[in-house]
Amino acid sequence: MKTDQGEKGISEIVGVFTDPVIVYPSGWEDTLPDWIKTAITLERLIESMKSVKGQEPTGTNAEALAYLYPASLAFPLSRDWTEIYLYLGKTVMEYHNPFHKEEPFPADLKVRPLEDDQVRELNRLKAWLYSHRNRSRIDRDRTDRREKKEEVAAQKKEAQPALFDF
C-alpha cells in the first residue's frame, strides 16, 4: 500500500513538470505567453504540496487562465466567463508576471470578486483540467510500462535459443 502511495506521489511530482498544458483548441494555442507556462509549473508545485498535506488536488488558476486564453480569442465569452477570465488574469498576472510592475493590470478594467456561482464554475473547470492532465499522465505511464514490458519480452525471446524449429 505504501509503495502505491509513494509511486503516486512521485508520479504527481513528475507530473508537475511533464503534464501537458491543456488549452481550448482554437488555433491560438501557440500564442500562450511563456510567463503563464512558468506560472503553471509553480502553481502545480504549490497544489502538489497542498495535496501532500491532505487537501484534494485540483487544477490551478494559471491552468484555468491558460485554458480560457485561446477560447477568448476564438469566440466571445459569456458575461460570467468574461468576469472569471478577467479575475484569473489579474490574479495570476499580479502574482507571477515579471512585467507586472512595469505593465500593471489595466486600471480601467473593473475586476470584481467572483460571485458564488462563478466560483463554482471556476472550481469545476479546475477540477476538469486536473482530471484530464492526470488521466493523460496515467495513460502515458501505462504506455511506457507496456512498451518496457514488450521490450524485455523481446530481449528474453531473442536471448533464448530455439529448442524446436518447425
Image (cartoon, rainbow, N blue to C red):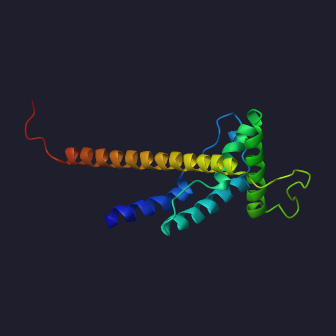
Quarter of the rendering containing residue 35: bottom right
The picture places residue 6, in percent across and down from the top left corner, at 39, 65
> Which quadrant: the C terminus?
top left
The residue shown at (31%, 46%) is 151
The residue shown at (53%, 48%) is 133
The residue shown at (67%, 51%) is 119
Relative to the observer, which residue lies in front, 23 or 54? 54
Furthest residue in direction bottom, as rendered: 53
> Which quadrant: the N terminus?
bottom left
From what the image shows, is residue 95 above or below residue 62? Answer: below
Can you see residue 138? yes
The picture places residue 131, in percent across and down from the top left corner, at 51, 48
Furthest residue in direction front, as rendered: 116
Q: Is residue 16 left or right of residue 141?
A: right
From what the image shows, is residue 82 above or below residue 16? Answer: above
The picture places residue 142, in percent across and down from the top left corner, at 38, 47
Q: Is residue 154 left or right of residue 140?
A: left
Furthest residue in direction top, as rendered: 166
